[in-house]
Image: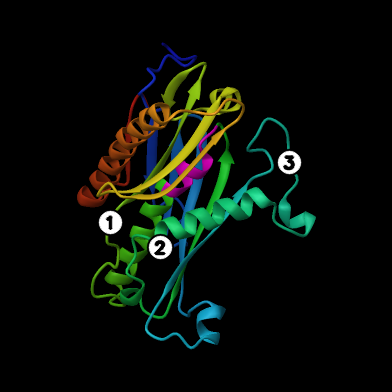
Amino acid sequence: MVREDGRKIDEMRPITISRNYIKHAEGAVLITTGDTKVICTASVQEQQPRFMREQRIKKRGWVTAEYAMLPRSTTERMQREATQGRLGGRTQEIQRLIGRSLRAAVDLGSLGERTIWIDCDVIQADGGTRTAAITGAFLALWDACKTLQHQGQLDDIPITDNIAATSVGIINGTPMLDLCYTEDSAADVDMNVVMTGSGKFIEIQGTAEQNPFSREEYDQMLDLSVSGIQQLVRLQNKMMLEDLDETCFGNA
């Protein structure tokens, strides 16, 4: 089965990652996945979050995340949540997902008594914004830790593994990898998968929109997601090991 953009069912969208995208942040990445574009920045704050200070937790840091979609990231302008006085449930769920995904690969004791804030801002949305945010945020976090190391504030980078994520779903009975918006909106089942570079799962979010899915279909989707995440991890490693400012795969 050939998809509307010509991809095979097991083919990722073209991906481009650009580092040092924001000059003031300790780590900053622009990740483009098809037509989805997310700016991920990592900012270092030299103190623990309030809850850790109140609990008097010593010699331990924290990584947390915020997520937002800009007003014209979609076809029609959406209102900024800040002007509504509260965050929507979807936003809260996604930023919590990003934070706990990244913390799964950080030795918080080695980070020291500081906080790294990860801000993921969607400037253009075409499906997979949360998974692109996680994949890009990992590199922004890595760069922030490298900055601290270069400044002599860290002896070693306290990151223990890669973190990457992708989406998968079932459309007209066919499992497909890395859904764009039109595919996601028509999917019978959609799933987001977050993994470490060593192949361990952090989170699997799977939902049937109408018809339930079988164990066999679940396994097929999981296999597709593992294949896609392995590609993303190789891309991350290429950037980290070769210290590239920009890299891509697919037709980007």
For the residue pair 43 and 114, the one nearer the viewer reads as: 114
Q: Nearer the viewer, mark 3 or mark 1?
A: 1
Residue 74: quarter of image: top right
Q: In the rendering, which numbered label is found on residue 161? A: 1
Relative to 171, is 206 above or below?
below
The local secondary structure at tag 2 comes to helix
Q: Quadrant of the C terminus?
A: top left
Q: In the rendering, which numbered label is found on residue 38? A: none
Residue 102 located left or right of residue 172? left
- The single residue placed furthest to the right in the displayed view is 84
Circle 3/circle 1 CB separation < 8 Å: no
Q: Name the chief secondary structure element in magenta.
A: helix
Whole-Å distance between the Cαs marked 3 and 1?
36 Å
Residue 219 among those drawn in magenta: no
What's the residue at 33%, 34% (across, down)? 248
What's the residue at 42%, 14% (across, down)? 6
Residue 80: x and y in percent read: 72, 50
Q: Given the image, on which type of amino acid does mark 3 rest?
A: Met
Q: Badge 1 local density, few (<14 within 10 Å), some, or many (20+)? A: some
Q: Given the image, on which type of amino acid does mark 1 rest?
A: Asp
